[in-house]
Image (cartoon, rainbow, N blue to C red):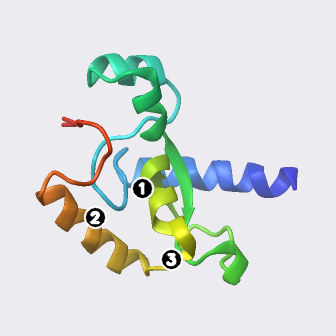
């Protein structure tokens, strides 16, 4: 199990760099190592900043045979990652990204005010 976690951690970091530190779904900045400075920079509470932490997102679920490979791991906010899988939904990454972008456009995605950029 430790080797799987280590592999995912490395792939998450690579995806973070490849995506210029932005979430694959909402295109907003996320943090990888320093939540306090991220919270200060964007005027967030520590609890809000936790939701914007970078996670390794399996584009094809691990339980559906998705492997921890560079093509299957993307970087996503903790919030976005959890929302994609909430309630047993299994939207494709493209479908979910479209939904997130629509809701962002209406200001109805994050459960707290977010002014990232």
Question: Can you give x and y, in whole percent of width and height, for residue 89 in the image?
Answer: 50, 77
Q: Is any atom of residue 99 visible in this view?
A: yes
Q: Residue at x 37, y 53 (%)?
A: 23
Q: Nearer the viewer, residue 53 or 3?
A: 53
Q: Are marks 1 and 2 in contact (CB under 8 Å)?
A: yes
Q: Earlier in the sequence, mark 2 or mark 3?
A: 3
Expressed as whole percent of the image width and height from the top left, the position of residue 38 reads 37, 24
Residue corresponding to mark 3? 89
Q: Which residue is mark 2?
A: 100
Q: Residue at x 19, y 35 (%)?
A: 115
Residue 80's label in the rendered image is 1
Q: Residues within 10 Å of mark 1 (few under 14, many from 20)?
A: many
State the separation of the CA atoms marked 2 and 3. 14 Å
Name the element at disc 2: helix
Position of residue 43 measured from the top left corner of the image (x, y, whole percent): 27, 20
Quadrant of the image for the N terminus?
Answer: bottom right
For marks 2 and 3, give the one nearer the viewer. 3
Helix, strand or loop at label 1? It is: helix
Using residue 26 as the reference point, say whether residue 10 is left or right of it.
right
Label 3 crowd (10 A; few <14 / some 14-19 / many >=20): few
Alpha carbon distance from label 1 to label 3: 13 Å
Q: Is residue 115 left or right of residue 29?
A: left
Badge 2: residue crowd in 10 Å (few <14, some 14–19, many ≥20):
many
Q: Earlier in the sequence, mark 1 or mark 3?
A: 1
């Amino acid at each position: 199990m430790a080797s799987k976690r280590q592999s995912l951690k490395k792939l998450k970091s690579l995806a973070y760099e490849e995506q210029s530190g932005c979430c694959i779904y909402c295109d907003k900045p996320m943090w990888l190592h320093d939540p306090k400075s991220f919270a200060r920079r964007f005027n967030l509470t520590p609890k809000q900043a936790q939701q914007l932490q970078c996670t390794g997102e399996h584009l094809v679920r691990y339980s559906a045979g998705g492997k921890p490979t560079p093509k299957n791991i993307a970087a996503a906010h903790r919030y976005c990652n959890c929302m994609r899988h909430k309630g047993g939904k299994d939207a494709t990454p493209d479908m979910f990204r479209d939904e997130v972008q629509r809701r962002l456009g209406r200001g109805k995605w994050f459960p707290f005010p977010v002014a990232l950029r």
